[in-house]
Structures are given as C-alpha cells and as structure tokens.
Image (spheres, rainbow, N blue to C red):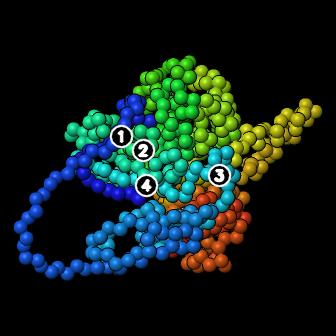
C-alpha cells in the first residue's frame, strides 16, 4: 500500500547498501525513529453542536483468480480507503472495473457510492530458474511515501506516476529476510535535511539504506536539478527502485557488506550492481520522456582503463563518475550476448533479472555469471579491449522498452547460423558454366528471402487508446492506435501490458470480440498481459480492439 504524506519531520538511515549518483557506502549503525510531539492543554468546554455527515457506500469484489483486502462498507464523505488486489497462484492482476488505475494497490477518496471489481488473468507456466521460490510470496512490497513540502508539486506528481509504472512493470515482491514495507523519504536540498538517523546525523544523498532488519529509500534531490530541468531528478527514482527490485530477488544482495568483498555471503560487484541500476534508469527515461540519458548522464564519464582493467570496477572504492564505466560495461555485455544469440531484450533481461534470481554472492558470482550469460567473466573482460570508450557506439535502440525486456520469452537463437550464404555459393556456378546467362540473378531474387517477425509493445494509460511501439514492414510503429502492416507469412509478436484492456485481433471492426469475429490462428488472443502471436495466412484488412472500450481500435493491413 502506498501512503502519501507531506511532512517536515525526521526519520532514519544506517548502512547504505546501494546508491545512486554522488552517494557513498556508509558504515553499520543502529536504527530507531525520532518523532516530535506537542502537548495541548485541555480547553474550556464549549456548547456542543450536531453536524450531519454525508456517507457513501463502497463495494469491492474480486473476479476469478484473486482476492481483495476489503469488501467495502459505509464511509464518511471524503474518507480515504486503500485497497489491495492479490492474485492467486497461476494468476496475475490485470486491472480494475470502476477505476483506470493499473496498480494492484489503490487509494480512493470516497465522495459517491462506489463499486470496484479487481480483475485477474491466468498466466502461462514458464520455465523456472534455480532460485529457491520458497523465500517469495505473492504480495508486493508496500511503500510509504514521506515527501517533504520543499518539493515542487510537479515533482510529486511525477514521483507518483513513476512509482506506479515501476510497481506495475517490474514488481518487487516480499520475501523472507527482507521487510514487507519500505519508507521513502524525499526532499529538496534547498532546505536542511528534515530527516535524521537515531544518532542525530542528517540523512543525505540517494540510496537504499538499512540496518540488517529494516531498509528505507533516501531521495535528496539537489535544488539545481529543478532549476536546470535535469532528468536525474526523475531518473534517480527509477535507479533506487531498481535496487529494491534487486533486493527482492537476491537475499545475498541484502546482506550487510563493505563493498570490498570481505563478506563471502554478500554481493559487492559494483559494475553489475550499479551498472544495472544506472542502465535501467536510462532506459526508463528514454522510454517515458524521450531523452537519451545515456548521452546526458553517463557517456561523458567513460575512462580508458575500463578497457584495460575492467576488473577494477568490481570495487566500490574505484572512482566511477555517475557510474558511467559500470553502465558502459553493461552495454558492452549486451553486445557480447547478442553475438552469441541473445536478442537485445533477452540480453537486458538476463542482466536485470535472471542473474539476480540466481542469488549471486561474492563467493560464487563468477560461476553464476557464466551460467546466466554462457560466457565466462575472463572472456568478457578480454573482449572489452576491442571496444572504444565512445559509448554512443553501443547505445541500445531507442525503441526498446522495459516491458519488452522484463516480459521477454524468446529463446537464445543461433541467428548467424541461419543466415549463411549457402544458397548462393560458387558451387552453383562452377567454371564449366561459363556463360553469364546460366547464372542470372533470378536464382537469388527476393522471393527466396525469409519472412519477417515484427515485435510491438502494447500498453494503455486510459480507456481512450492503445499505445503501440515497435516495427512493421514500413518501419517504426508508435503512438495511439496506429495502423500497422505486414505481408502474408510475416509474424507479429504483440507484447501486451494493458491491465483492464484485453487486446483482441478481429476480422470486422464493429463485430465485437465474439468467437466468430476473432482471427484464426492467433495465440493468446485477448490477453491483457503477455505475448499475443499471429502469422497472417491471407491478405486483407484486420483490426485490433479492446474488449471493453471499442474506441481503442486500430487497423492491420496484410498484403501478399
């Protein structure tokens, strides 16, 4: 449950486990809370008056596959009620009937009779990793917001939007050994730090801090970032949330350490820890704000020794401005993984998610590295010698999305082996066939080329439009309900993340989503979360549409 509070009091800090720009690793201390209470003497009694309070009813139900934290009741006008939707095993939360929110945890203000229904969808069983799933449960970590009054309203609005997006896209689940809730403290450093630790020291910087049993997020936003409209004032939110995501997957990540490998059961590899978080924040900003934060925030800081001595960036004591070198190594690892058959999405997913699910430790991280990426760490470090420190040469595509990365289900493929030139080798044109008419280009015309596969991400921020991002036979696809096209034999892979808006492929635009209007041969048609696959077999005009909102409609043109 997210609780939004504006305060100017104080709280916490202890061991800085992971941190963002301009933050350091702190030492162990003891945590407690400090509060200030004022005493008000009893006042002289005054005549009582009777006030009529308007009340409204709230009805909350759960669809098949899940439950809700409350069934509702009768509340005073203006009351605030928090509701949590929890999916059963084999299901996932997909949205609300009665609310446009895509978050499974919502807080509503009662000002009329209200009915809400939590919706859930069944998920396909996927191959599990070696992670001990007994340490996890199905509940998301609860966040409590303490946002100081020194922060502009615009930042607070964006903070809430970013947190809702992140919790929906890369949910951080509760697990044994990690707190079920986390407080987030944020303020503008134009004022003295309003929060202190139990020893009276002011909290500073941006970090996930803890004392071994409790953890909290600190977001001190420099005032000049507001003045200069710096993207970092928003990207730091994604950076620190990603560390929570890492904590939720890897118990070793939460073990107290000094950043110098002195605890074999902890995890201290800086370039993998911070490089992942900083690369993630850049992808998030690129996707949601259209800003190349790799260029703005990191490319300028790459040093030559990242090519000659990459192992030095395993240590937090190594200088790494804005984690530029750590990000460089992550992007280089993506390229190396592409060389051995990973898609870009699968490469990032392996770095952001799969590796941490293996719970790597200082004692075994190199082994887990090779198991996850299929290449050993020494080979990767050696490969960096062939790179340039110009990060722009290895920027990821501007069309890649966090949803596609986290939800990618592709297998590692031997792409290069499938695209050899065996069909046009000299064995077809031996020296005995001397005339040019016997080796005309008609033998290798484009009719022999393989079909294309187009990947398109589908999201929805309201009940007005689907938002598509990807490619079709004409190039890039983006925007609200855009038209898309392909040829017979091409394939579409729609990566859908649109809770409450089931995505259907249909034949007739006004024919609804009855079974007789659905396109044949579509896998997972009507999903609101997951991958919908379709290989057109006949030319014509088709459509995509939302089951509940017919205005969310787009055209698909298939040609021979």
Query: Which residue position holds label 2?
Result: 214
In x, y percent, where is residue 492? 64, 58
Q: Mark 1–mark 3 contact, CB under 8 Å? A: no
The answer to whether residue 129 is above or below residue 67 is: above
The N terminus - image quarter: bottom left
Regarding residue 421, the answer to whether it shows in the image is yes
Residue at mark 2 to residue at mark 3: CA–CA distance: 34 Å
Query: In the structure shown, which secondary structural element does the residue marked by tag 4 occupy?
Result: strand
Q: What residue sits 61% from the left and 63% below the top?
A: 89
- The mark lying in front, picked from 4 and 2, is 2
Measure the alpha-carbon separation of dots 3 and 4: 28 Å
Q: Which residue is mark 4?
A: 142
Q: Position of residue 183 (x, y in %)?
A: 37, 49
Q: CA distance from mark 1 to mark 2?
A: 8 Å
Q: Residues within 10 Å of mark 2 (few under 14, many from 20)?
A: some
Q: Residue at x 32, y 56 (%)?
A: 4
- The residue singled out by tag 1 in the image is 31
Residue at the spot x=87%, y=40% of the render? 438
Cα separation between marks 1 and 3: 42 Å
What separation in Å lies between label 1 and label 4 (alpha carbons)? 20 Å
């Amino acid at each position: 449950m997210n609780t939004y509070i504006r305060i100017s009091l104080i709280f916490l800090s202890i061991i800085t486990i992971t941190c963002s720009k301009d933050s350091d690793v702190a030492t162990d201390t003891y945590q407690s809370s400090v509060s200030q209470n004022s005493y008000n003497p009893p006042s002289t009694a005054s005549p009582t008056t009777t006030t009529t309070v308007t009340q409204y009813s709230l009805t909350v139900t759960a669809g098949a596959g899940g439950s809700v934290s409350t069934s509702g009741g009768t509340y005073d006008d203006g009351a605030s009620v928090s509701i949590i939707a929890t999916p059963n095993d084999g299901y996932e939360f997909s949205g609300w009937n009665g609310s446009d929110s895509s978050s499974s945890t919502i807080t509503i203000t009662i000002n009329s009779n209200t009915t809400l229904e939590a919706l859930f969808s069944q998920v396909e069983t996927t191959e599990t990793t070696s992670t001990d799933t007994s340490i996890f449960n199905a509940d998301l970590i609860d966040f409590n917001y303490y946002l100081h009054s020194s922060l502009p309203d615009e930042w607070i609005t964006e903070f809430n939007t970013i947190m809702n997006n992140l919790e929906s896209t890369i949910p951080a689940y509760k697990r044994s050994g990690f707190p079920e809730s986390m407080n987030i403290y944020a303020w503008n450093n134009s004022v003295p730090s309003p929060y202190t630790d139990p020893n009276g020291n002011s909290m500073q910087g941006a970090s996930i801090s803890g004392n071994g049993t409790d953890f909290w997020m600190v977001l001190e936003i420099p005032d000049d970032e507001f003045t200069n409209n710096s993207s970092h004032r928003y990207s730091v939110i994604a950076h620190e949330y990603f560390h929570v995501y890492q904590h939720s997957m890897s118990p070793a990540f939460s073990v107290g350490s000094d950043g110098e490998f002195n605890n074999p059961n902890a995890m201290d590899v800086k370039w993998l820890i911070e490089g992942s978080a900083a690369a993630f924040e850049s992808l998030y900003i690129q996707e949601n704000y259209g800003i190349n934060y790799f260029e703005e925030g990191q490319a300028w800081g790459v040093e030559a020794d990242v090519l000659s001595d990459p192992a030095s960036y395993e240590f937090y004591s190594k200088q790494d401005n804005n984690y530029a070198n750590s990000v460089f190594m992550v992007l280089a690892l993506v390229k190396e993984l592409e060389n051995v058959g990973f898609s870009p999405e699968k490469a990032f997913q392996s770095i952001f998610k799969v590796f941490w699910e293996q719970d790597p430790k200082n004692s075994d991280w190199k082994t887990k590295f090779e198991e996850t990426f299929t290449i050993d760490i020494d080979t990767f470090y050696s490969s960096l010698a062939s790179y340039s420190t110009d990060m722009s040469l290895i920027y990821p595509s501007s069309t890649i999305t966090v949803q596609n990365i986290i939800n990618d289900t592709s297998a590692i493929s031997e792409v290069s082996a499938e695209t050899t030139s065996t069909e046009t080798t000299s064995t077809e044109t031996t020296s005995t066939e001397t005339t040019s008419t016997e080796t005309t280009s008609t033998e290798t015309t484009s009719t022999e080329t393989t079909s294309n596969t187009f990947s398109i991400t589908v999201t929805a921020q309201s009940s007005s439009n689907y938002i598509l991002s990807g490619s079709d036979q004409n190039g890039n696809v983006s925007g609200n309900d855009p038209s898309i096209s392909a040829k017979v034999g091409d394939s579409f892979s729609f990566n859908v993340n649109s809770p409450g808006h089931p995505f259907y492929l249909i034949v007739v635009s006004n024919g609804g989503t009855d079974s007789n209007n659905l396109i044949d041969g579509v896998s997972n048609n009507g999903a609101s979360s997951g991958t919908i696959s379709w290989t057109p077999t006949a030319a014509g005009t088709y459509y995509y549409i939302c089951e509940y909102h017919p205005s969310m409609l787009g055209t698909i043109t298939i040609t021979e």
